Structures are given as C-alpha cells and as structure tokens.
Image: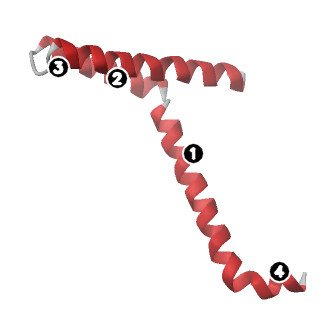
Amino acid sequence: MLTQILSYPVMGPVRMSMWLLRTIAERADAELYDEGKIRKDLATLELSFDMGEIGEEDYQRGEDDLMERLKESRRRAEAAGR
C-alpha cells in the first residue's frame, strides 16, 4: 500500500493515459465495425460509382473493403451473442 501511495505521482498519470488509450481504441473499433455505418458507406460508394465520380477499380476496391468489415462486424456480433 505504501508503495502504491509513493508511486502514485508517476503511475497515476500512466494508468490514466492507458485507460484513455483503451477507451479511444474501443470507440474507434466500435465505429469501424458498426453495421449501420458500413451499410451507409456501401450506399455512398455505389452512388459515387453510379454518378461517375469513381471508376470501377476504385469501386471494387472500396466494396471489397466494406464487405470485409461487414463480415467482421457480423462475426463480432455473433461472438458477443447478439
């Protein structure tokens, strides 16, 4: 206990920084694999392609990336029991 008290001026900020980094990583991960956001991004990508703003190669690459994220999102939801 005395060690914890004496090390607090150094370890306190370190622990707080670690907590903050974990929280940011969790939020970023949740947003990256949010199924609703992925579906919206797919629709936006398709609209961009249909309007000629992007080429077929860019469309395919974007679609492949988003479909992989969608699969991972569903796998994570299944693993979490949702």
* Residue 9 to residue 45: above or below: below
Q: Amino acid at mark 2?
A: Lys
Total marks placed = 4
In the picture, measured across the screen, residue 81 lies left or right of residue 69, that is: right
Task: Read off the residue under disc 1.
Answer: 26
50 to 48, vertically: above or below: above
Between the C-alphas of marks 4 and 3, the distance is 57 Å
Marks 4 and 3: which is nearer the front? 4
- What kind of element bears circle 3? helix
Tell me the CA gap for discs 4 and 1.
28 Å
- Give whichever of discs 3 and 2 has the lower sequence position: 2
Of labels 3 and 1, earlier in sequence is 1
The quadrant in which the C terminus is found is top right
Residue 40 - label: 2
Q: Position of residue 18 (x, y in %)?
A: 62, 62
Instruction: Indicate which disc, 4 or 3, sits on the residue closer to the N terminus.
Output: 4
- The residue wearing badge 4 is 4
Marking on residue 81: none
Nearer to us: label 2 or label 1? 1
x and y, in percent, of residue 28 in the image: 48, 43
Q: Residues within 10 Å of mark 4 (few under 14, many from 20)?
A: few
Residue type marked 3: Ser
Distance in Å between CA atoms under marks 2 and 1: 21 Å
Q: Earlier in the sequence, mark 4 or mark 1?
A: 4
Q: Nearer the viewer, mark 2 or mark 4?
A: 4
Q: Which residue is mark 3?
A: 48
The answer to which quarter of the image holds residue 4 is: bottom right
Q: What residue lies at 52% left-to-right and 17% top-to-bottom?
A: 71
Q: Which of pointers 2 and 1 lies earlier in the amino acid sequence?
A: 1
**Three-letter residue code for mark 1:** Glu
- Per the model, the C-alpha gap separating discs 3 and 2 is 12 Å
Q: Earlier in the sequence, mark 2 or mark 4?
A: 4
